[in-house]
Image (cartoon, rainbow, N blue to C red):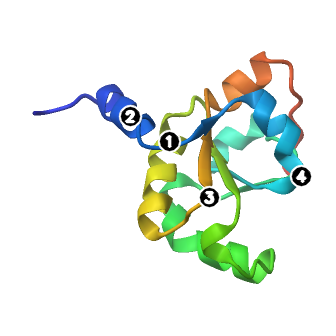
Amino acid sequence: MLLTSQQFVDVIKEKIIEISPKQLSESADEVVLIDVREPQELEGGIISNSYPIPRGTLEMNIIAYLVDTLKVEDVSNAPIVLYCRSGARSALATESLKRMGFNNVSSLKGGIAQWSSAGYPLVEQS
């Protein structure tokens, strides 16, 4: 059966953990926050303490970022939250990282759009 992109994302979302903006705001200091949007999308701001790794290169760069930059020792169990604009790309990315062996990865439900509409702040990318 052929699925539309939205149907496919809906299937993936049933297999992953999505967290709300409120849940993220309460645990933001305890997670590795990755923005999977494209570089040109970051001009409107990012969630504080997040690191941009575009969706297209995430699987190739995530381990190096965790080990080399953050000095994470237990990479497979690092608490990771991914986000994009609406939550679709981050859902797909979450499933991909799960398949790579990451055990504690989730997606921000509704993405940065829902984060912003809930009144949470954005910062300029440094």
- Which secondary structure, mark 2? helix
On the picture, is 86 further left or further right than 27? left
As displayed, is residue 101 above or below residue 35? below
- Tell which circle, 2 or 3, labels the residue nearer the N-terminal end: 2
Taking the image as drawn, is residue 14 in sight? yes
Q: Are dots 2 and 1 in contact, CB under 8 Å?
A: yes
Q: Nearer the viewer, residue 44 or 22?
A: 22
Q: Name the residue at 72% across, 42% down.
A: 42
Residue 101 at x, y percent in the picture: 48, 69
Q: In what element is the residue under mark 4? A: helix
Disc 4 to disc 1, C-alpha distance: 21 Å
- Specify the label residue 104 is tagged with: 3
* Crowdedness near tag 1: few (<14), some (14–19) or many (≥20) residues, C-alpha within 10 Å: many
- Count of all numbered marks drawn on residues in the image: 4
**Mark 2 or mark 1, earlier in chain:** 2
Residue 86 % position (x, y): 57, 29
Q: Residue at x 38, y 29 (%)?
A: 10
State the CA–CA distance, disc 2 to disc 3: 20 Å
Q: Where the N terminus falls, by quadrant?
A: top left
Name which of mark 1 and mark 3 comes first in the sequence.
1
Q: In the image, which disc is placed on residue 9?
A: 2
The 10 Å Cα crowd at callout 4, few under 14, some 14 to 19, many 20 or more, is: few
- Residue 91, labelled with which disc? 1
Q: Is residue 23 above or below residue 90?
A: above
Local crowd size for mark 3, using a 10 Å CA cut-off: few (<14), some (14–19), many (≥20):
some
